[in-house]
């Protein structure tokens, strides 16, 4: 259970945003089509990221930086490089954790919670969660971004995630931020930088 809470802390987040304009039905159709086409064309993603973890008992958010590697259909590696070294790999229904050389492995094939979390993470990276029947989905437009909010229907999931938010750059339909909100109000915001799609990513990147 300890590893479950470590993983959940890595990915939960939210943000309160003002000036949200609800998308019309036609705008939603056009937006989803653009994102799904980008998703269809994506074989790999590499990106730097900055993660901001907000905890109510701390005065300042905990900031970490790292690198993301994704390879279709569902190979994912989150590598934290500063201020500590830590990596999480999703591979072949297994979760591999390397905490500064202290390695562990979790079989997620029989764990509904982990399998669902794996799907959420993979789809949020690509930006395409629109067909997931496990969420109620709300669409908004900001000045330069689309904001899509996903509210879990499953009560067991809602114990850990009250809402997921994806922010998309309007010009490219590419996801630029992922946020997950905990019921407590604590959150993590992951901001992608220098994202590159469809570069060569060798399988060795996901070795454990």
Image: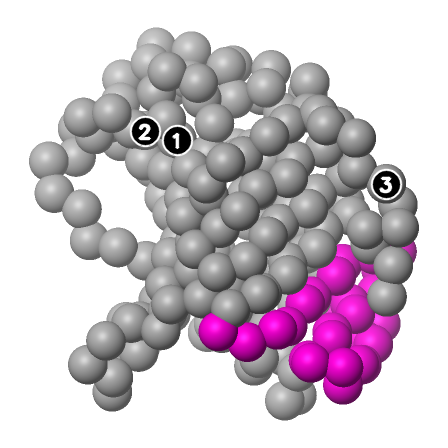
Q: Which residue is mark 3?
A: 202
> Local crowd at mark 2 within 10 Å, few (<14), some, or many (≥20)?
many
The residue under the point 48% across, 60% down is 65
Q: Which residue is mark 1?
A: 168
First to last magenta residue range: 83-112
> Pointers 1 and 2 in contact (CB under 8 A)?
yes
Quadrant containing the C terminus in the rendered view: bottom right
Determine the main secondary structure of the stretch shown in magenta.
strand
Residue 112 appearing in the image: no
Question: At numbered mark 1, what does the secondary structure look like: helix, strand or loop?
Answer: strand
Q: Quadrant of residue 146?
A: top left
Residue 70 appearing in the image: yes
Residue 146's mark? 2
Residue 163 percent location from the top left of the image: 38, 56
Closer to viewer: mark 3 or mark 1: 3
Residue 159 percent location from the top left of the image: 46, 74
Distance (Cα) linking label 1 and label 2: 5 Å
> Local crowd at mark 3 within 10 Å, few (<14), some, or many (≥20)?
few
The residue under the point 76% across, 58% down is 90
Reply above or below: 122 against 107.
Answer: above
Reply above or below: 132 against 116.
Answer: above
Q: Quadrant of residue 100?
A: bottom right
Residue 112 percent location from the top left of the image: 72, 66
Question: At numbered mark 2, what does the secondary structure look like: helix, strand or loop?
Answer: strand
The residue under the point 48% across, 55% down is 153
- If you read the primary sequence from the N terminus, does the residue marked by circle 3 or circle 2 appear first? 2
Closer to viewer: mark 3 or mark 2: 3
- If you read the primary sequence from the N terminus, does the residue marked by circle 1 or circle 2 appear first? 2
Residue 41's mark? none
Quadrant containing the N terminus in the rendered view: bottom right
Is residue 82 covered in magenta?
A: no
Number of labels in the image equals: 3
């Amino acid at each position: 259970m300890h590893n479950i809470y470590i993983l959940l802390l890595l990915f939960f987040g939210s943000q309160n945003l003002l000036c949200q304009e609800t998308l019309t039905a036609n705008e939603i159709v056009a937006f989803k089509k653009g994102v799904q086409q980008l998703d269809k064309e994506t074989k790999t993603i590499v990106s730097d990221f900055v993660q901001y973890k907000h905890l109510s008992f701390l005065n300042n958010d905990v900031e970490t930086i790292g690198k993301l590697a994704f390879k279709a259909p569902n190979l994912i590696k989150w590598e934290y490089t500063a201020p500590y070294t830590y990596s999480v790999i999703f591979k072949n229904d297994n979760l591999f954790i390397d905490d500064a050389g202290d390695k562990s492995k979790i079989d997620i094939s029989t764990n509904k919670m982990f399998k669902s979390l794996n799907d959420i993470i993979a789809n949020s990276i690509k930006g395409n969660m629109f067909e997931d029947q496990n969420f109620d989905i709300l669409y908004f437009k900001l000045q330069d971004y689309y904001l899509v909010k996903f509210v879990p229907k499953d009560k067991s999931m809602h114990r850990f995630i009250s809402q997921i938010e994806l922010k998309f750059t309007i010009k490219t339909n590419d996801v630029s931020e992922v946020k997950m909100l905990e019921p407590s109000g604590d959150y993590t915001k992951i901001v992608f930088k220098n994202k590159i799609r469809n570069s060569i990513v060798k399988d060795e990147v996901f070795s454990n």
